[in-house]
Each structure stands twice: as C-alpha cells, then as structure tokens.
Image (spheres, rainbow, N blue to C red):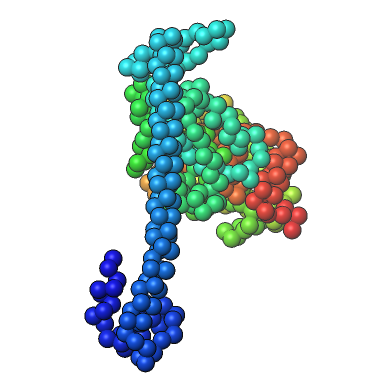
C-alpha cells in the first residue's frame, strides 16, 4: 500500500492522532513531513505481524482439514475392507441374504446359524426383590431365546423404578413379569406362527408369562374373611382363590385355618371363589349363601369333605345335595331364597371374572401382599414362605 500519498492528505492533527493510536508520542509543532515519515514507519512495523497471524490461522485450518480428510479415508478403507470380508465369507459359506429362514453352515469344525433379521429389543418388567425360584426371569429369557429368537437384547426394568412405573402406566400393565417386544419382532421369518404368543399393546407386542406379582388387586369386596383381623387396611393380607371341587383347595383349607389361628390378629386372610369347571358355579353359589348366614367355614368344610358325592353329579343332584347340607347348617328357607337369587350368582361370577383378570390358572392361588403363590404347602413351609415374601415387601410378621 502507498502510505506516503495517503498520509500527505492528512493535516497535522490527524497525523498526531494516528501516531498516538500506535503508541507514538507526537505534537503539531513537528513538521508535517516528519509526522508522515513516523506514521509510515509505524504502519510498516505493524504490517508483518498481522500477516504472520493470518498465515498461522491458514496453517491451522489446513492441518484440521487434512486430519478430517485422513479420518474419512480411514473409515472408508475400514468399511471397504470389512465389506470385502463379508462378501468373501458369504461366498465361502454360501449364505443367501434373500432367504429369511435361519441358514446352517459348517466352517472348520464348527457349526454356525445365520439369522436374517434385526436385533429384537425386549423390556422385561419384573420384581427384582422377589427371591423365590419362580420369580427368576432368567428361565423366561431362556424360553424366549429357544422359542422365539436368540437375537434379542433384554433390558431388565424393576417395576418400582421410575421407568417401571412409566411402563406400567403407559401400557396399563398389572401382572408381572411381562415382556415387551419392539416392532422388529414382526420381521421374524416365522412371526405369523408365533403371533399367538403375543398381545399387541399400542406400539409394542406384549408377552405375558405365569404371573408372580400383581400391581393392583385382588379386591377385598365380597371376599370371605376368616381371621379375627378384618381391617381392610391391614398391612398383611392373604387372599386365596379356591375351587370348591379342587382336591388341592380342600387340602389347603386346614393350613389356612391354622395360620389364621396362629396369626389371625396380625394378618387378614380371605377366600374368594375360583372356577375349575364342572359344578363349581353351583357349589360357590351355595357357599355364598352359607356365608350370608355366618356359616361359611362350616359350609366350606362340608363341601370339601363330601366332594366325591357332588362333583360329578347333575345340576339337579348338586342342588339337592347342597340343600341337604343347608338343613343341617343354616336356616333352610333363607338358604333356598339366597340359592335362587340372581344377585348371589352375580357375586360368584364377579369372583370368577376377577380371577381370570389376575392371571389365576389353578387353585389354590394365594395373593400375599400382591405377590402370587400357587400350590399346597405344610403349615411350617407355608409360614416360612409367607415370612419370606413379607420380608421382601418390608413387612415384619413379628410386629
């Protein structure tokens, strides 16, 4: 730049101000030629520094650009080599990517199976505090691996965690454990054969297994409480679904009565009806009538003790048999009115319906503070299991 011609057009005051900006002391008493010369020198002194700074930035930019290009080339090379490897492997093992079914091939002394579908993601909602063997979901995951697909990624979610509560609310879940499959499960080659395992729930496919816990329920409404403690707010509740025709249910009754006698002031024990078919509906209706006259347990004992005389009988014979029991246990005319009353039948139907909604598949089934226990036990064994469950629920039986 021609500084001399530019600065000669400045007056002395402007030249002095320019020099001061460069940190040079000057005044208007000096000649204009001297001021111009000083300003030219100052400008030239500063110009190489700015040029050097600009070149440094350019060098830095080019270095970053070169590194980026090198990184891209490296990724491209790795991807190219890997694709060449896959192509060679496919040729060697004769894998046909257009076939959806699993393909089996041999390489060396090993056998491989190739699955042509994406990784299926599965969320398992369960109770991590339950330590009973039936609460171990590893066996469920093994069944998924063997019966549905080995290519899945499980995420274990405790029902009481923030995510667990969100899933339960989002998909209206109540029985645990439950397994939630994402949409990729539909890409299984044999999904049409396995779709019956699932229930579609919004954007996921739900796989329900034998439940070990219920989040809500069962209701105590119309249940038959057999303990001294009848408080619905009791911290220890045992609700049992029993079938009048079930031998296993009849064997469980003495255990329940012993437990009620031993801990009846500390826990609430109630019985509800479960239908295994046959004459259970008529028998449960009769038991409801015994209950309404405060003779539920005597009626239940009689029903169990005489099972072989009514379980395989006709409807008329069953009605006659329970009317015979009624003559010995309760006011007969009140029993007959109750036995023929549709409202009594509806109570029994409500029990049957609720048991289905809660996943009950056999009798007796025990709901112990929302944990589910199935089967018959000796009193000591059952009390130990109850204590174990209550401890996992942070309830002290000794209080």
Could you say where residue 228 lies in the image, as x and y percent from the top left? 66, 56
Quadrant in which the C terminus appears:
bottom right
Please name the residue shown 29% across and 73% down the image: 4
Asked if one can make out residue 63 in the rendered structure from this viewpoint, the answer is yes
Q: Quadrant of residue 156?
A: top right
Counting labels gives 0
* Of the pair 281 and 109, the residue shown nearer to us: 109
Asked if one can make out residue 292 in the rendered structure from this viewpoint, the answer is no
**On the rendered structure, is 162 left or right of 315?**
right
* Of the pair 245 and 99, the residue shown nearer to us: 99
**On the rendered structure, is 117 left or right of 9?**
right
**On the rendered structure, is 136 left or right of 222?**
right
Please name the residue shown 54% across and 30% down the image: 141
Q: Is residue 124 above or below residue 230?
A: above
Please name the residue shown 36% across and 13% down the image: 96
Could you say where residue 154 lies in the image, as x and y percent from the top left? 51, 35
* Of the pair 292 and 84, the residue shown nearer to us: 84
Could you say where residue 149 lies in the image, as x and y percent from the top left? 46, 24
Q: Is residue 289 above or below residue 115?
A: below
Extreme residue toward the bottom, this view: 29
Could you say where residue 321 lies in the image, as x and y percent from the top left? 51, 33
Quadrant in which the N terminus appears:
bottom left
Please name the residue shown 36% across and 21% down the image: 189
């Amino acid at each position: 730049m021609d500084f001399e011609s530019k600065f000669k057009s400045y007056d002395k005051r402007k030249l002095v101000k320019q020099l001061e900006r460069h940190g040079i002391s000057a005044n208007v008493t000096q000649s204009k030629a001297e001021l111009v010369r000083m300003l030219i020198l100052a400008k030239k002194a500063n110009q190489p520094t700015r040029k050097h700074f600009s070149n440094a930035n350019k060098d830095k930019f080019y270095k970053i650009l070169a590194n980026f290009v090198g990184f891209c080339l490296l990724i491209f090379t790795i991807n190219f080599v890997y694709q060449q490897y896959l192509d060679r492997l496919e040729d060697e093992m004769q894998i046909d990517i257009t076939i959806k079914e699993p393909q089996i091939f041999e390489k060396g002394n090993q056998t491989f199976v190739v699955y042509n579908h994406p990784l299926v993601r599965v969320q398992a909602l369960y109770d991590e505090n339950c330590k009973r063997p039936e609460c171990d979901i590893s066996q469920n995951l093994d069944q998924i691996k063997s019966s549905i697909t080995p290519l899945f990624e499980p995420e274990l979610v405790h029902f009481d965690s923030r995510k667990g509560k969100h899933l339960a609310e989002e998909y209206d879940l109540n029985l645990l454990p439950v397994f939630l499959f994402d949409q990729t499960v539909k890409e299984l080659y044999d999904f049409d054969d396995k779709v019956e395992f699932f229930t579609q729930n919004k954007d996921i496919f739900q796989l329900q297994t034998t439940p070990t816990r219920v989040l809500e329920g069962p209701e105590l409404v119309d249940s038959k409480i057999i303990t001294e403690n009848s408080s619905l707010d009791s911290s220890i509740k045992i609700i049992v679904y029993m079938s009048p025709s079930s031998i296993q249910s009849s064997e469980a009754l003495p255990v329940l009565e012993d437990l009620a006698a031993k801990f009846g002031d500390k826990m609430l024990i109630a019985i509800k009806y479960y239908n295994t078919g046959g004459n259970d509906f008529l028998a449960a209706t009769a038991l409801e009538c015994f209950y309404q006259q405060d003779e539920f347990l005597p009626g239940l004992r009689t029903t169990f003790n005489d099972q072989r005389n009514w379980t395989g009988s006709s409807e008329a014979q069953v009605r006659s048999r329970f009317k015979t029991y009624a003559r010995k246990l309760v006011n007969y005319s009140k029993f007959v009115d109750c036995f023929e009353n549709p409202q009594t039948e509806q109570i029994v139907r409500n029990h049957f319906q609720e048991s289905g909604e809660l996943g009950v598949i056999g009798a007796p089934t025990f709901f112990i503070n929302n944990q589910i226990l199935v089967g018959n036990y000796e009193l000591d064994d059952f009390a130990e299991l109850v204590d174990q469950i209550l401890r996992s629920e942070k309830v002290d039986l000794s209080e």
